[in-house]
Image (cartoon, helix red, strand yellow):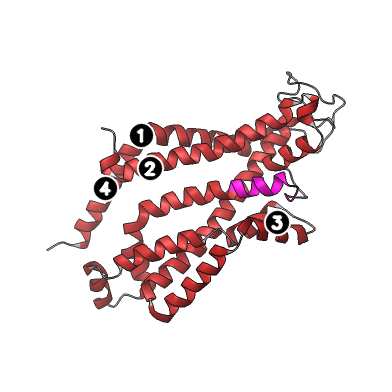
């Protein structure tokens, strides 16, 4: 008869196998290297820089040099300093906004899928209402009415409107898993619904949940960049999107100040692209049919 120790041993062995294939998958390695490399820049560089993002130097519109690695803006701000702080702000919004959306999506999806009945109908109706709302328009309206906008408030707004697709997918998978034999056995053993969801249902969706986190993280960064670019970004901090917005507002393209808008644009592209590559690689890791031996 299969024991809990045997099941745990099989689970650990499967996790090690997936970890082994993950480190052998070039997409996962390259994607994580890009994202983690930029994350280190955002975490470490601001601690080592003596200048502030808003500090102005005498050298205005200066091209990249040894003194100013990424040059300076039209106002004399050091672009690399803004770049480092902007990366940190963008990662903060992505992590917090994606995390909020993930928690809400999981809570709604698991509750609706496991409970069923009227609870499922109500939560499904709520999900559909949020799903059909023009999220970008709602975000623009809410951001407009906030006088003091920061990364945290921006992330909360993004997270609250980004969870429906996760909830629907989790609900659908929970419907198929809740009638499995091991779930029925857990019910007979006296376990409560939250325990069954966490210990029995969730582990069987681990691969999908991990990839959902990555997609939500990248989506939150893109949403934030769009809001920043149209002038609805943080009012008390700098971000990659606000750097691009300021550069376009002051005609950096026409003035030939490419070093003002190219670094933040490349960083956003690299972060989102790296996350996408990682997600594709993880899909190959979790699906044995897609593995390249």
Q: Nearest the camera: 32 or 260?
A: 260
Q: Which is closer to the viewer, label 4 or label 1?
A: 1
Q: Is residue 20 above or below residue 199?
A: above
> Image quadrant of residue 77?
top right
Report whether 210 appears left or right of 184.
right
Q: Mark 1 points at which residue?
A: 25
Report whether 115 appears left or right of 238.
left
What is the magenta range?
221-233
Circle 2/circle 1 CB separation < 8 Å: yes
Q: Compare marks 4 and 1 and give the one earlier in the sequence.
A: 4
Taking the magenta stretch, the answer to whether it contains residue 232 is yes
Q: Mark 2 points at which residue?
A: 282
Q: How crowded is mark 2: few (under 14 residues within 10 Å), some or many (20 or more)?
A: many
Q: How crowded is mark 4: few (under 14 residues within 10 Å), some or many (20 or more)?
A: few
Q: What element carries label 3?
A: helix
Q: How far apart are marks 4 and 3 (CA)?
A: 45 Å
Q: Is mark 1 on a helix, strand or loop?
A: loop
Circle 4/circle 2 CB separation < 8 Å: no
Q: Mark 4 points at which residue?
A: 14
Q: What element carries label 2?
A: helix
Residue occupying the point 68% across, 42% down:
241
Q: Mark 3 points at which residue?
A: 140
Q: Does the rendering let one see residue 53? A: no
> Image quadrant of residue 170?
bottom left
| Residue placed furthest toward the right | 58
Q: Which is closer to the viewer, label 4 or label 2?
A: 2
């Amino acid at each position: 008869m299969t024991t809990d120790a045997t099941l745990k041993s099989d689970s650990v062995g499967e996790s090690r196998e997936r970890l082994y294939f993950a480190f052998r998958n070039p997409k996962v390695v390259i994607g994580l290297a890009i994202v983690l490399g930029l994350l280190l820049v955002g975490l470490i560089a601001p601690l080592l820089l003596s200048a502030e993002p808003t500090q102005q130097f005498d050298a205005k519109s200066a091209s990249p040099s040894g003194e100013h690695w990424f040059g300076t803006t039209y106002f004399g701000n050091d672009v690399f300093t803004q770049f480092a702080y902007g990366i940190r702000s963008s990662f903060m919004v992505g992590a917090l906004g994606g995390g909020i959306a993930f928690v809400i999506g999981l809570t709604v999806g698991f509750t609706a899928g496991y409970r069923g009945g009227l609870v499922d109908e109500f939560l499904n109706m709520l999900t559909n209402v949020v799903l059909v709302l023009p999220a970008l328009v709602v975000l623009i309206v809410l951001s407009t009415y906030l006088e003091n906008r920061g990364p945290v408030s921006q992330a909360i707004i993004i997270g609250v409107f980004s969870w429906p697709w996760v909830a629907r997918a989790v609900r659908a998978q929970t419907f198929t898993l809740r009638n499995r034999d091991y779930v029925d056995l857990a019910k007979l053993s006296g376990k409560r619904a939250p325990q069954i969801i966490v210990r029995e249902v969730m582990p069987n969706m681990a691969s999908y949940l991990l990839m959902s986190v990555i997609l939500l993280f990248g989506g939150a960064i893109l949403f934030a960049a769009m809001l920043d670019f149209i002038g609805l970004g943080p009012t008390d901090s700098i971000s990659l999107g606000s750097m691009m917005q300021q550069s376009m507002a002051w005609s950096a393209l026409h003035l030939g100040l490419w070093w003002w808008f190219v670094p933040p644009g490349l960083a956003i592209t690299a972060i989102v692209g790296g996350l996408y590559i990682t997600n594709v690689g993880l899909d190959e890791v979790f699906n044995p049919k897609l593995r390249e031996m």
